[in-house]
Structure formats: C-alpha cells, structure tokens
Amino acid sequence: MGVKGFVEGGIASIIAGCSTHPLDLIKVRMQLQGESPAPATATVQNLRPALAFHTTHASNIHIPPLRVGPVSVGVKIFQQEGVSALFSGVSATVLRQTLYSTTRMGLYDMLKQKWADPNTNNMPLSRKIVAGLIAGGIGAAVGNPADMAMVRMQADGRLPMAQRRNYKSVVDAIIQMSKSEGVTSLWRGSSLTVNRAMLVTASQLASYDEFKEMILRKGLMKDGLGTHVTASFAAGFVAAVASNPVDVIKTRVMNMKVEPGVAPPYNGALDCAMKTIKAEGPMALYKGFIPTISRQGPFTIVLFVTLEQVRKILKDF
C-alpha cells in the first residue's frame, strides 16, 4: 500500500506538472520583474522595476514600476522567443515532479493511512496539516536540484544573449551547476524550497481532503468529478495564498548569478525579502499571484482528478 501511494501520486503529479508548465513559466518570469538582468552588480538603487525582459536603461534615471499581467508576459515570451519557449525547462518539471511530488504524495498517503480513524477513514484537520508539513518538507529536500534547474531554465530567456546559461536539458543544467558553482549549489535556496513545499503540501492536500469531506458530509454533491473539481480548486486557491511570498523569494534566490570574487546580490532569504520590499514595495512578494492561482487552480484540479482516476484503475493492485 505504501508503494502504491507513491506510484499514484507520481503519475498524477507528472501529468499535472506538464499540462500546466507554461503557466508556471509565466509565473516565474513575473516574479523576476523588478530584478536587474545582471544581478551580480545589482543594488537596491539600480534594481530594474520594469518588464521581466531585457531592455536598455540609464541606471541613474528613476523608472516607475510597470505592472504587467500574465497575458502580456505570455505574449511577450511568444513574440520574442517563440512558442517552444513556453515549455522551457519542461524536462526539469518532469524530474521535479518525479522526485518532489512523488515523495510528498506518497508520504502524505502513508501518514494518512496510519493516522486516520480506522472506522471513518478520516482524520482531524490538525493531523492532515502535520502530515502535509512533514511530507512536503522531505519531498522538497529530495527534489531541490530539479527545482533549481527548472527555475533557471524558465528564467533564461529573459537574460541578454551573452548572459544566458543555455542549458540543453535538466541533466545538463545539474552538471553545469555542479561544475561551475559546486555540488552544494544544487541545494541553494533549499530552506525556502522546503518552507514553500511544507506550506503548499499542508494547505493543498489537507484542504483538499477537508473540502471533499465537508461537501460529502453536507450532501452538497456526490463523490464524483464535480466534488473533485470543486474541492481541488478551493485547495489550489488556499495553497497559492499561503505560498506566494515564499515562492517569489525562492525564485529570486535560485535564479541569482553567483560569480567568483563578486558579492552575490542576496545574502540569503531574509536579505532577498528586505531588498525586494525596499526596492519594490511589500506587494512585490505577491508578484505573479495571478498566474500562480491561474496555475495552482488547474494544476490542483488536474492533480486530484487524475489521482482519483488512477486510484480507481489501480484499486485492485
């Protein structure tokens, strides 16, 4: 039963991750709005509050922040880089879902079976949250290298041609990072990844189970596609609200370019948060929220609807 939970969660996660990858890419680009394309020399004074694409500008001229929506960012990516750019880093998404989501889904399923009431097969919300925190943290630690590669591959297109990393695949990205920045660089931002994953898993999986049980308990709908879609969309919204600030900081810390002999643009998560807020305002921590919820909603729906169908298929195994 333990292995079965990992297999079911892994299949559902890979399908959901690949189908919503373009939305995730747009989210990453929006979260990088306001950053300089050359972060090694960036300071609070010259962080560029403009589009998440390379433009020339005078560093001594104050340019007010431009608010660019997900549709505009998506169109800009399509125009400048082509339709294939919307799937930049998809190989890293597959590896990330294989490592991170398979682990968290399987562990959560194991904990739920162990802690649930044997008569009702339900467990209190507090236990669901604890199970999600544990499963998410372990899953994130396992999947951090793939997460690093995915963020960099998705962000590469916004850099000037001379500064692009041009990773050929997720394996090439991991090898290049290990050679140029050391093996430990694969776990850069891992504390943020773990924190975000704990928040996402606890809010997403626990709230899905809670919403589903509430709908069935009150007789609002029968156990079927309608219930699964409603509960999963609500869970996606909860997860997006809880995780977006950590996600913004994680994206920026993972994407920063560290060069020998040059001070990194951020000295950690707290420094990144303070510089971001000082340069762009506190709402910068919710940059990319629209594509986050636009992605979390469909991702969570596809994830749980697929999971429920996979469970039906594998119920006799």
Image (cartoon, rainbow, N blue to C red):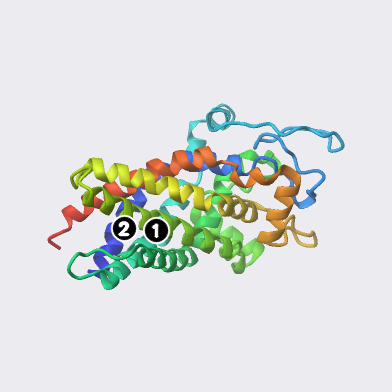
Q: Quick check: 75 left or right of 50? A: left
State the residue in front, 248 or 178. Answer: 248
- Residue at mark 2 to residue at mark 1: CA–CA distance: 7 Å
Mark 2 lies on a secondary structure that is helix
Q: Are marks 2 and 1 in contact (CB under 8 Å)?
A: yes
Mark closer to the chain start, 2 or 1: 2
Look at the image and tell me in which quarter the N terminus lies. bottom left
Kindly tell me whether residue 75 is visible in this rendering. Answer: yes
Whether residue 263 is situated above or below residue 222 in the rendered picture: below
On residue 101, which mark appears? 1
Please say whether residue 36 is visible from this viewpoint: no
Percent x, y for residue 283? 64, 43
**Which residue appears at 40% of the width and 55% of the height?**
97
Q: Which mark is residue 253?
A: none
| 227 sits left or right of 15 in the view | left
Task: Provide the residue designation for mark 2.
Answer: 9
Q: Residue furthest left?
A: 316
Q: Amino acid at mark 2?
A: Gly
Identified at 65% across, 37% down, the residue is 52
User: Residue 118: horizontal and vertical position, in percent?
Assistant: 19, 70
The answer to whether residue 157 is above or below residue 252 is: above
